[in-house]
Image (cartoon, rainbow, N blue to C red):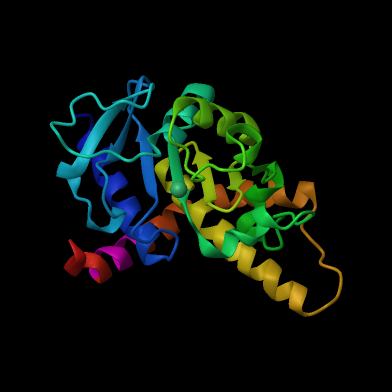
Amino acid sequence: MPTRTLVEDLVDAGHILFHEGVLDAFGHVSARHPDGERFLMSRSMAPVQAGAGDILAFGLDGEPADAQGRKVFLERHIHAALYRARPEVRAVVHSHSPALIPFGVVSGAALRPVCHMSGFLVHGAPVFDIADVAGDGSDMLIRDRRLGDALAAAMGGATIVLMRGHGVTVAADSVEKAVYCAVYAQANARLVLDAARLGGEIRYLTAAEGLAAEHANDGQIGRAWDLWRRAARQATAGLR
Ligand SMILES: [Zn+2]
């Protein structure tokens, strides 16, 4: 097992994402192993209940190195595909974040930043429609390598991909940023829907504003991480 810190961060990430309302019993978070050729993710369980002993190593083919009979997530292929396709990606969050689902199912809807905290959305939020790859009778899950690769291709270089009728996946260069983006993508979705209720035209951040805001926020992510971790550790201790 690699540095204890990375395993701890991954465990904290699951607790934070539950506490912030991004993950529930489902969804998962992973981190690329420092050697670059593997990734770390818990065995199949609710992320808020995972501890360091539940973290397993997986090859970039999505298969666990030594699961010792423990059940692994079906959708580990989401993570494996992104680590294969994007060397800069160090962490991945997959959620069924309810506020984001509408943006993947309404034609013409677009998830664009309306708030500086979600400036990273200027990199786009493409929609992956599993029906394009698996036909119109799938169970919507990314359950094999082919579907994982199709999802990664649809995502391109974006920070987030919307998965029609299913959820979202976020990829970033650190566990802290992946968690930050998963939280603020959901917050941005709620803000867009609130703004739409006011009836006027929505004025989104420009591309330049989004990039500048992302740059500014990148220096502040540690503040959010420290707060969320402390709050989550206290609030979820009884669930483990
Ligand atoms: Zn899923």
- Residue 208 is left or right of residue 183, and the answer is right
Which quadrant holds the N terminus? Answer: top left
**Which residue range is magenta in the image?**
229-234
Q: Is residue 156 visible?
A: no
On screen, 193 above or below 117?
below
Q: Main secondary structure of the magenta part?
A: helix
On screen, 79 above or below 222?
above
Which quadrant holds the C terminus? Answer: bottom left
Residue 220 in the image, given as x and y percentages of width and height: 50, 54
Residue 52 in the image, given as x and y percentages of width and height: 18, 45
Q: Which quadrant would residue 201 be assigned to in this image?
A: bottom right
Farthest residue, direction bottom: 198
Q: Is residue 54 visible?
A: yes
**Residue 81 falls inside the magenta stretch:** no
On screen, 66 above or below 40?
above
Which one is nearer the viewer's eye here, 2 or 236? 236
**Residue 232 falls inside the magenta stretch:** yes
